[in-house]
Amino acid sequence: MTLFNSKIIAVIASFIGGISVAKAETPPTVFAAASLTAALDEIAQSKKIKPQFSFASSGALARQIASGAPADIFISANIKWADWLKTTTSDIIVNEKTFLSNSLAVVSYQPQTQTIKKLFQNENDFFVAIGDPTHTPAGIYAKQSLEYLNLWKELTNKLAPSSNVRAALYLVQSGAADYGIVYKSDALNAQNIHLVDILPKNSHEPILYQALLLKQDNQINAKATSLFDNLSDTDAITIWKKFGFQPLKN
């Protein structure tokens, strides 16, 4: 959809639902999953849009928006958090799209040649960094995968839960944790770590990213609409693939 068509839709919506279109020059505020940081920043630059970004775990961001934090776009790494926000604040949702997928990877501080099971069943002292499984999508997926592999109970006392997946990745990069379970996109683009293996896709729920276009004070930000519309255009797809994501077909 072109920016012109998006503006027309927004204007029509203003007559139907009392929504007005925000000034085009207003920078959009984008709340996005931490794993999207580098790729989304490059996409915004390619569109010559300068959003005010807030990157964190999807759960933390969803709760902030539900509590009144102003956002024009929310991109979640977990469909459940997007659905929760849609249920909690349905009056601010303008549009939605599920447009990306990802995989889960095991990374290490030192090079490794052993399988994941042999590494994690080792009796030596070690720590595994993951996102906090109580609210971060990466942590939720990691727990699902470890349970599937019958490793969750064995690792309970060796886990280092983090506020988001980027924080978990940093623990491995700094050597504070021996291993980490992060997204494939993080593993492929991070320095000072080693990719051990990709966890089986059937060991966890599908990792899908959903974007929500939001309104603030009954206004739709024009630049936010443009960015939202172009998250899955040809140029954006090239950038997503460059950073290790798997764009979904519309």
Image (spheres, rainbow, N blue to C red):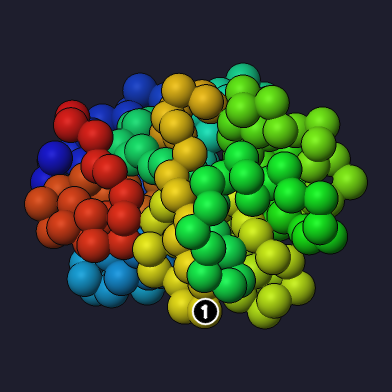
Q: Position of residue 173 (x, y in %)?
A: 61, 75
Please identify the quarter of the rendering in which residue 80 is found: top right
Vertical order, 93 against 188 (above or below): above
Q: Position of residue 164 (x, y in %)?
A: 66, 55
Nearer-the-camera pick, 217 or 79: 79
Vertical order, 118 against 82 (above or below): below
Identify the residue shown where x is 46% and y is 72%.
190
Q: Is residue 87 visible?
A: yes
Identify the residue shown where x is 35% and y is 32%.
98
Name the residue tied to disc 1. Answer: 192
Q: Which quadrant of the figure contains the C terminus? A: top left
Q: Which quadrant of the figure contains the N terminus? A: top left
Please identify the quarter of the rendering in which residue 241 is found: bottom left
Vertical order, 46 against 127 (above or below): below
Identify the residue shown where x is 18% and y is 31%.
249
Graded by Cα atoms within 10 Å as few (under 14), some (14 to 19) or many (20 or more), the crowding at tag 1 reads: few
Q: Position of residue 123 (x, y in %)?
A: 81, 50
Q: Is residue 57 left or right of residue 49?
A: right
Vertical order, 175 against 166 (above or below): below
Q: Is residue 64 visible?
A: no
Q: Is residue 91 left or right of residue 123?
A: left
Q: Is residue 191 left or right of residue 40?
A: right
Q: Position of residue 9 (x, y in %)?
A: 23, 34
